[in-house]
Image (tube, rainbow, N blue to C red):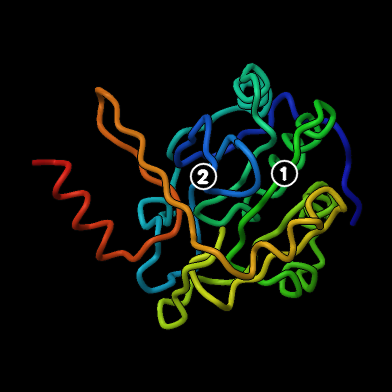
Amino acid sequence: MGVEGGGDERAMLNVGAWMERSVANGPGERFVLWLQGCPLRCPDCFNPEFLPLEPRHLVTVPNMAARILALEGIEGVTYSGGEPTLQAEPLCHLSQRLREAGLSIVCYSGYTLEQLRDRDDPWIERLLSYLDILIDGPYLCGQAANLPWRGSRNQRVHFLSPTYRHLAPQIEGGPAEVELAVGRDGFAATGNWPAEFWERLRKALER
């Protein structure tokens, strides 16, 4: 079965959350989009609120693209979750718009690259073709590691385009990065850190 073009005006994303600027989810300053829904149940998942397979924030592809492209100074976009590949079709439409505007694309998946290709899903294949980096594999708490962009040692960074391949030597060492944004309406955190540390920090900030 082939993939037909068009249809992006009506394509809808089920979004868990987004952060307009982050430096902890891939190279450079990036817009991060967390997709809602994941069939995997990794113990100590970093984002349990995005696991339920239910509608959260439904946003059309044109509206999300406009929000992202209105930002100045970002290098690209990172898809996280949840499991982004469950929404491969609308992400393809979004990715096409972003790439045409010169932004790079990073995507996380709890599935390995081999598993995604074995699915023989034309939308997933097309999504992979838009990616500069795929970070694959489930989070395994028994292999938790202090690595850039990853929570556990089993997860791999695939450079699917030449854009960031020069960074390959740098990601095998060095600390993970975390971010904490505090505002009037609460706080948001992103990055890879131990679940017990996040729980302690959450309680401290809520006092």
The number of numbered discs placed on residues in the rendered structure image is: 2
Compared across the picture, whether 135 is left or right of 35 comes to right
Name the secondary structure under disc 1.
strand
Name the secondary structure under disc 2.
strand
Work out whether 14 lies above or below 170. Answer: above
Q: Residue furthest right?
A: 2
- Between 5 and 74, the residue placed more toward the observer is 74
Check disc 2: other Cα within 10 Å, few if <14, some if 14-19, many if 20+: many
Q: Residue furthest bottom?
A: 142
Q: Which residue is mark 2?
A: 34
Q: Residue furthest top?
A: 70
Q: Which residue is mark 1?
A: 105
Task: Give the mark nearer the N terminus: 2 vs 1.
Answer: 2
**How far across and how far down the image is residue 137, in percent?**
60, 71
Task: Tell me the mark number nearer the camera, choosing from 2 and 1.
Answer: 1
Whole-angstrom CA distance, mark 2 to mark 1, is 13 Å
Residue 117 occupies quadrant: bottom right
- Between 73 and 5, the residue placed more toward the observer is 73
Compared across the picture, whether 4 is left or right of 20 comes to right
**Residue found at x 29% / y 26%:** 183
**Residue found at x 72% / y 74%:** 115
**Residue found at x 49% / y 53%:** 37
Check disc 1: other Cα within 10 Å, few if <14, some if 14-19, many if 20+: many
**How far across and how far down the image is residue 123, in percent?**
79, 52
Q: Amino acid at mark 1?
A: Ile
**How far across and how far down the image is residue 32, in percent?**
55, 39
**Residue found at x 22% / y 57%:** 199
